[in-house]
Image: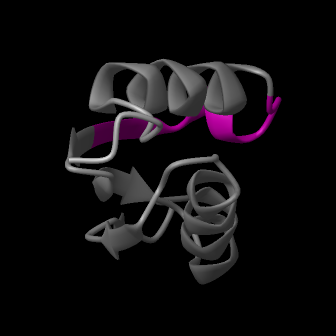
Amino acid sequence: MNVAAIDDATIQAEIEKKIAGDSTLSTLDLSTIVEGGKVTLAGSVRSPELKQRAEKAVRSIKGVVSVDNQLVITEATP
């Protein structure tokens, strides 16, 4: 194992910081699981754009190897 690799807890903390710092993403019901640098995104969002935005934010984190975006798009009820 590469000792210079970023551990999952650090990646998780960076993801949480990134989401909390985004005024749009911070209001969403998102959860993330990090295993060996692979991130699973779960929860629900209101649009395909938000789903993509969340994934892009997570992908930008140093140490993330891949993203499994399982966010579900739910239509907002009037």
Tell me, yes or no, if residue 73 can be seen here: no
- The image shows residue 52 at horizontal and vertical percentages of 62, 75
Q: Nearer the viewer, residue 48 or 74?
A: 48
Residue 41 located within the stretch drawn in magenta: no
Residue 30 located within the stretch drawn in magenta: yes
- The image shows residue 4 at horizontal and vertical percentages of 47, 36
Q: Nearer the viewer, residue 57 or 37?
A: 37
Describe the colour scheme in one phrase. Answer: one colour
Q: Is residue 67 above or below residue 17?
A: below
- The image shows residue 9 at horizontal and vertical percentages of 32, 20
In this rendering, position of residue 44 left or right of residue 70: right
Question: Which of the 4 image quadrants contains residue 50?
Answer: bottom right
Q: Is residue 10 above or below residue 60?
A: above
Q: Is residue 27 above or below residue 58?
A: above
Q: Residue at x 70, y 57 (%)?
A: 60
Tell me, yes or no, if residue 34 can be seen here: yes
In this rendering, position of residue 44 left or right of residue 77: left
In this rendering, position of residue 35 left or right of residue 24: left
Q: Residue at x 31, y 40 (%)?
A: 32
In this rendering, position of residue 20 left or right of residue 32: right
Q: Is residue 30 above or below residue 54?
A: above
Image: magenta residue range: 22-32
How many numbered dots are placed on residues in this image? 0
Q: Quadrant of the C terminus?
A: bottom right
Q: Nearer the viewer, residue 3 or 23?
A: 3
Q: Residue at x 51, y 49 (%)?
A: 63
Q: Residue at x 54, y 63 (%)?
A: 46
Q: Nearer the viewer, residue 17 or 8?
A: 8
Identity of the residue furthest to the bottom in this view: 48
- The image shows residue 71 at horizontal and vertical percentages of 33, 65
